[in-house]
Image (cartoon, rainbow, N blue to C red):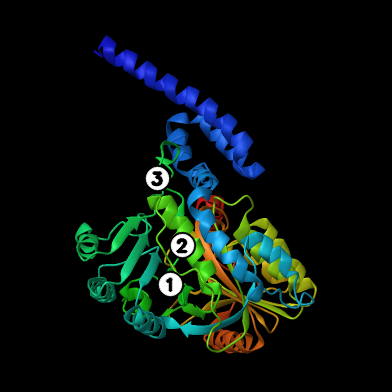
Amino acid sequence: MISEDWLIIGFALAGFFYVSGIVLAIDAVMTVRTSQGSIAWVVSLLTFPYVAVPLYWIFGRSKYHGYIDARRTESRDIQPIIDNIIPELPEFVVRPDESRMNFRVMEELAAMPFTRYNDAELLIDGEQTFAAIFREIESARDYILIQYFIIEDDEIGREFKRALISKARAGVRIYLLFDEIGCLGLPNAYLRELKDAGVEVSPFNTTKGIRNRFQLNFRNHRKVVVVDGRAAYTGGLNIGDEYLGRSDSFGHWRDTHVCVRGPAVQAMQFAFIEDWYWATHEVPALNWSPARSESGDKSVLVIPSGPADDLETCGLFFVHAIHSAKKRVWIASPYFVPNSKVVAALQIAALRGVDVRILMPEKADHLLVWLSSFSYYNETEPFGVRLFRYQPGFLHQKTMLVDDEIAAVGTANLDNRSFRLNFELTLLIVDEEFGVRMKDMFEKDFANSKIVEKGELDAKPIWFKFGVGVARLMAPIQ
């Protein structure tokens, strides 16, 4: 016999879930960004509240309100930085030739201006990237800012830790920010060693605040290293042996990073400080005086994006870049799960005669995302978009080339998670010389890829196509 107390508890829980389902269904109608998403959540919350209510707590929101609130209150601490930079900006601010693209749109999305007198070095794959970053860390004299989505306690991870400990003991200030979901497997002992050496370490604190307690779906996907306010790195590589091709599962790991020197470094630094302030409510003293690079006069725009933005910055960035293309738009991304706006932009560009190519991996690291990419074959390939699957190993780079001189390198993938749920960082570099290097890099990657043939999805077995359809339904939360 079930006791009366247990019956009361059961009825109370049932009432809680059904009332919560009604309240959250109203919230979904008012806040979920797509009609399909709203309908799906409302039906689920009202029909299966025991399952849907916990899922909505985790996956339901697309706005990271705690971070938004922090931005509103941070002005007291951040404003002095802005006040110091503004007098020096006129010398460095420039807008590239607008006949190639309406760059004002990009500046509005970034909430930052283009700067000139920058140099940018393209770093291809792990050996080049880690060698350059370790050299930069060794050269640090004042401070190092570091932000990663994933840090592994493996061979390269331990080398990274030793480099930071050495510099911290030499008196260099080091601030390390990591995503606690991406670094879930990182041992506490690893972080404790860094802290004991004097490194300031903090998780991004995704779930900080009562409204964010269950919001595990947001990620800080940025990868940033800034040294002394004079050099900065970003791109696709995290800290782990697989990024050096040491994984038996993936083999060769194809990735791209970039190093910038010049006033764009201060813009990258500012994006880091906003994240650090959210996590710690502290603003370290840094070098905020922009300086010309020793060589190069590239125009660079730093575009931070994330779920705290008023607009879907990342997705709109891709849409505007694709619409602006006159000759080519080549995009490399490990995940191809675009929203309807990006799909339409790709279709229209191809119909205009633009050379539109999407480079993806042949291998899968996330099965649902990999399967979802197949569902876009029939929405792109028939209209002239050419799809390529990289063959030698796993392709993880996040790059884009528009025409001959507009290049993007960063952390954002061509998927819903980067568009709406992740904090990302992209560098837009306008320069013919850098564009040539990007073009050469892409052409080598295409030569190592297999083009998707017409009807390739239709030729797959029925069970595979069913899996693709199911994965496509999960796209909003992948």
Asked if disc 3 and disc 2 are in contact, CB closer than 8 Å, the reply is no
Q: Earlier in the sequence, mark 3 or mark 1?
A: 3
| Residue that mark 1 sits on | 226
Q: Answer with mark 3 or mark 2, whichever residue precedes in sequence.
A: 3
Residue 207 bears which disc, if any?
3
Residue 54 located left or right of residue 265: left
- In this view, the residue in front, 90 or 324, is 90
Q: Foreground residue, 21 or 122?
A: 122
Alpha carbon of mark 3 to alpha carbon of mark 1: how far? Answer: 26 Å
Between residues 193 and 34, which one lies in front from this camera angle? 193
Q: Are marks 1 and 2 in contact (CB under 8 Å)?
A: yes
Residue 455: tell me if it is visible.
no
Q: Is residue 127 above or below residue 78?
A: below
Q: As shown in the figure, which amino acid type bears the numbered disc 2?
A: Phe
Q: Which residue is mark 2?
A: 272
SS class, disc 3: loop
* Residue at screen point 33% across, 72% down: 240
Secondary structure of residue under mark 2: helix
Q: CA distance from mark 1 to mark 2?
A: 9 Å
Lower position in the chain sequence, tag 1 or tag 2: 1
